[in-house]
Amino acid sequence: MKKNKSVEQICLNIFFIILSLIIICPLLTLVGVSLSNEKDVVEFGYRIIPKKIDLSAYQYVFKNPEAIINAYKITIFTSIVVMVLSVFLMCMVAYPLTKKNFKHRSALSFYLYFTMLFSGGLVPSYILITKYLHLGNTIWVHILPGLISPWYIFMIRTFFQGIPEEISESVYIDGGTDYTVFFKMIIPLSKPVIAAVSLFMFLGKWNDWFTSMMYITDDKLIGLQYLLQRIMSNIQLLQSSSGTAASSQLRDVSDIPAETVRMAMAVVVAGPALVVFPFFQKYFVKGMTVGAVKG
């Protein structure tokens, strides 16, 4: 019996080792290509171990370090602020929806659900944000429009509903108020779902390039993703004009670090997000499963 269990454990370990290698190999390839020479990539293809270490891709990305650093500041600041404010506001909305004596619970739930089915559209949203709210070319356009997500509100509400009502009743008996229950009991007991939603909101804002493209013309307010997208567009423009007199100093297209710069940008963007994830990993799976299964 023990022998069968040990064989099963060995097979299970081998399976997860192979699975881990499958997952980690693309990441290692990404780093390897970013450290390679463009000509080596064109000639030999993608390699985990570079044929020759070449930092020209990172030199190209950080050609203007002030712009990169400023874009990092904007993205980090807005991602953290959006994560904190959105989770707080969505928890404040979700908590009343768990109360059976809340008279407008059904109407508010339907209102939130309706916004998941239909949106105002791109043009009305642009007019609202720029002409009426006057958020264009301000730091607030990165923060305010995306604070509330109905999907995450329902996810948080479902988790709140799984917390025994006896906990709230005991606080009320001791003279506590709704604020005491919410901040002292509900929030501390909801760390798993809060961590999961926080991670999603952080990554969503971290990967946001559309806001900078649509509403920002001031280079000091653009995010990291959009800045790197502009760098990639410049490379593609150089490649398309590689045969003209404007780029006659380039010997051939392979002199332009296109693939290596693309991988270097992916490393630059993914690095901080990979650092943040372990802090949420402890609660992430539990928050997703409990919030999704309970009805």
Image: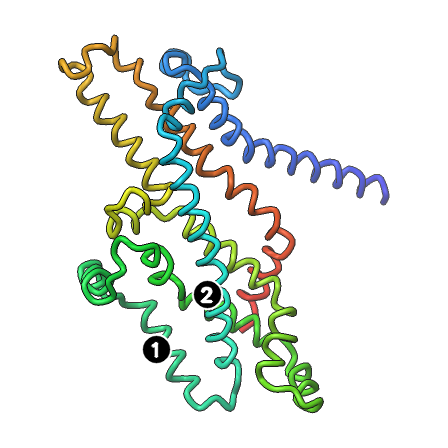
Q: In which quarter of the image is residue 231?
A: top left
Residue that appears at 36% across and 79% down? 110
Residue at (77, 37) in percent of width and height = 7
Name the residue beneath numbered marker 1: 111
User: Which percent across, then down, holds residue 228?
Assistant: 34, 35
Measured along the vertical axis of the image, is residue 75 above or below residue 259?
A: below
Q: In this view, does 37 lie to the left or right of 289?
A: left
Residue found farthest to the right:
2
Q: Is mark 1 on a helix, strand or loop?
A: helix
The spot of residue 135 in percent (x, y) is 27, 60
Left or right of residue 294, residue 221 in this image: left
Q: Distance between the residues labelled 2 and 1?
A: 14 Å
* Amino acid type at mark 1: Tyr
**Image quarter for residue 134?**
bottom left
Residue at which label 2 appears = 152
Dot 2 crowding, Cα within 10 Å, few <14, some 14–19, many 20+: many
Label 2 residue SS: helix
Q: Which of 20 and 226 is in front in this view?
A: 226
Please name the residue shown 52% across and 80% down the image. Answer: 98
Give amino acid for label 2: Tyr
